[in-house]
Image (tube, grey):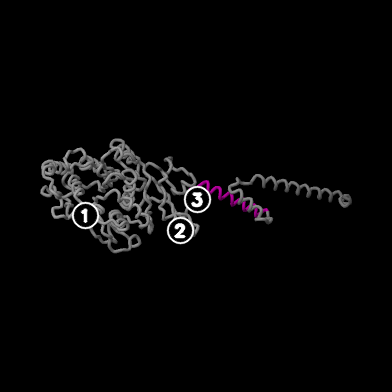
């Protein structure tokens, strides 16, 4: 104070001005700092970083922490899908072009309770295989692989078992229970646009229960397996058809030729869950014609050993590396498939279906569904094939083969015309002369 008084008037004025400027600068800095504090995204982490982990830090370092925190908050809020992909370390975005918008990482959705697309919650059955959560989860502290059902074939898993599609957009869970006395439950591979093929099937062999054939009568139920709709028109088609016939089972998987393995696994799972009490399971494509009366009679003639096998036209087939049925070496390294059922039609006792599903949990994915399910999985499940190929007809049926062949791929002859011939044959001959299909005891092979 004494020094201040000794200063000349001009000096005192200059010193006062400097002090005033310093005070104003301090007030401005405090106001700026308070106005720019971001929303607390990670409270515990922010507090720890601002405190320097127990050490004092500079104002610049604090500003950097705050800016980075605000930036991370903005990125997370703007793109939660990317955050999910980083945490699960796998891109599991599955576009549903049918009824459900976009599903992101089913396992992560269940854990974080994220809802996407307005669809109902994921079923408790939509879980990953046990081997995906086995030893590595505890020993290496790694997360189990999430359930993944691809929408396109180029996203199919390589070198890992396929996840069974356990979620259905249209399920018909009471189908078998509403039909007491069913002897056969058939699941037919179809796609949404193939309306005429499904109608032909409904009016021919799928309607066999309506015919009284005496001891050759058969009580059969048929459902059509389809995948996700690709647009609103397909969605309307399949919903209206389902409401009319109640025989559509729509799974939550991409409906693509190279994803037929998922369709097959979904069909087997649906049967094991809802039709386990039905003695026989039949698989067919929607363009196949079947003499179901003759086939059913053949099943009754089989001995107990044969009934533990696939009843089908079986074959050994080379693994093709080019063309429509191309399979890369990374997908299947062998040069030949195991013995498998060809031709799109086979029978299996329903009680054996769970063995195939269990085998799928440890056998890597293969898109060729016939070879995978009836060959590779059957080999793993120790289910053999019964040699039935001599009873499968050529693409075009012949009248003289009636009563001797059980299935055809009809192309030129309308299926309803051929079905009328089958019905007439069994009415005239089978009811009065039920000759055995195995005159030489081949049923014991």
Q: Quadrant of residue 228?
A: top left
Residue beneath label 2, please?
A: 135
Determine whether, in the image, residue 68 is placed left or right of residue 310.
right
Which quadrant does the C terminus fall into? bottom left
Which residues are the magenta region?
A: 59-80
Mark 1 / mark 3, whichever is N-terminal: 3
Number of residues whose C-alpha sits closer than 10 Å to that of mark 3, classed few (under 14), some (14–19) or many (20 or more): some
Q: Quadrant of residue 245?
A: top left
The answer to whether 295 is drawn above or below residue 336 in the figure is above
The residue at the point 65 percent across, 52 percent down is 50
Tag 2, which secondary structure?
helix
Q: Give coordinates of residue 255: x percent, y percent.
A: 33, 48
Depth check: give the residue in front, 219 or 168.
Answer: 219
Mark 3 vs mark 2, foreground winner is 2
Residue beneath label 3, please?
A: 83
* The magenta stretch spans residue 78: yes
């Amino acid at each position: 104070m004494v020094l201040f008084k000794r200063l000349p008037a001009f000096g005192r004025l200059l010193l006062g001005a400097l002090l005033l400027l310093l005070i104003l600068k301090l007030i401005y800095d405090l106001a700026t700092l308070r106005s720019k504090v971001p929303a607390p995204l990670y409270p515990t982490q922010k507090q720890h970083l601002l405190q320097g982990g127990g050490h004092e830090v500079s104002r610049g370092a604090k500003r950097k922490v705050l800016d980075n925190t605000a930036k991370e908050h903005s990125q997370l809020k703007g793109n939660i899908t990317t955050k999910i992909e980083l945490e699960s370390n796998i891109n599991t975005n599955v576009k549903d072009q049918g009824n459900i918008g976009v599903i992101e990482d089913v396992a992560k959705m269940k854990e974080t309770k994220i809802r996407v697309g307005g669809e109902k919650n994921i079923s408790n059955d939509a879980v990953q295989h046990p081997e995906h959560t086995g030893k590595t989860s505890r020993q290496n502290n790694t997360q189990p692989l999430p359930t993944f059902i691809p929408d396109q074939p180029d996203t199919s898993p390589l070198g890992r078992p396929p996840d069974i599609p356990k979620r259905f957009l249209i399920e018909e869970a009471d189908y078998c229970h509403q039909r007491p006395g069913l002897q056969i439950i058939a699941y037919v591979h179809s796609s949404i646009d193939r309306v005429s093929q499904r109608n032909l099937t409904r009016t021919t062999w799928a309607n066999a229960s309506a015919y009284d054939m005496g001891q050759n009568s058969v009580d059969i139920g048929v459902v059509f397996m389809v995948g996700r709709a690709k647009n609103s028109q397909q969605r309307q088609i399949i919903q209206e058809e389902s409401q009319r016939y109640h025989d559509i089972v729509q799974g939550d998987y991409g409906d693509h030729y190279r994803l037929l393995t998922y369709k097959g696994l979904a069909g087997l799972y649906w049967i094991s869950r809802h039709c386990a009490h039905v003695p026989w399971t039949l698989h067919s494509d929607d363009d196949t014609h079947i003499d179901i009366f003759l086939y059913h009679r053949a099943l009754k003639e089989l001995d107990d050993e044969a009934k533990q096998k696939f009843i089908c036209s079986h074959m050994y087939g080379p693994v093709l590396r080019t063309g429509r049925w191309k399979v890369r070496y990374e997908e299947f390294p062998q040069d030949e498939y195991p013995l498998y059922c060809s031709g799109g039609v086979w029978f299996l006792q329903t009680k054996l279906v769970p063995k195939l599903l269990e085998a799928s949990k440890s056998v890597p994915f293969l898109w060729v569904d016939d070879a995978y399910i009836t060959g590779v999985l059957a080999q793993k499940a120790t289910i053999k094939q019964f040699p039935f190929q001599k009873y499968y007809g050529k693409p075009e049926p012949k009248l003289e083969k009636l009563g001797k062949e059980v299935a055809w791929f009809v192309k030129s002859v309308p299926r309803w015309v051929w079905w009328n011939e089958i019905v007439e044959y069994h009415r005239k001959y089978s009811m009065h002369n039920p000759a055995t299909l195995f005159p030489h005891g081949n049923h014991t092979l």
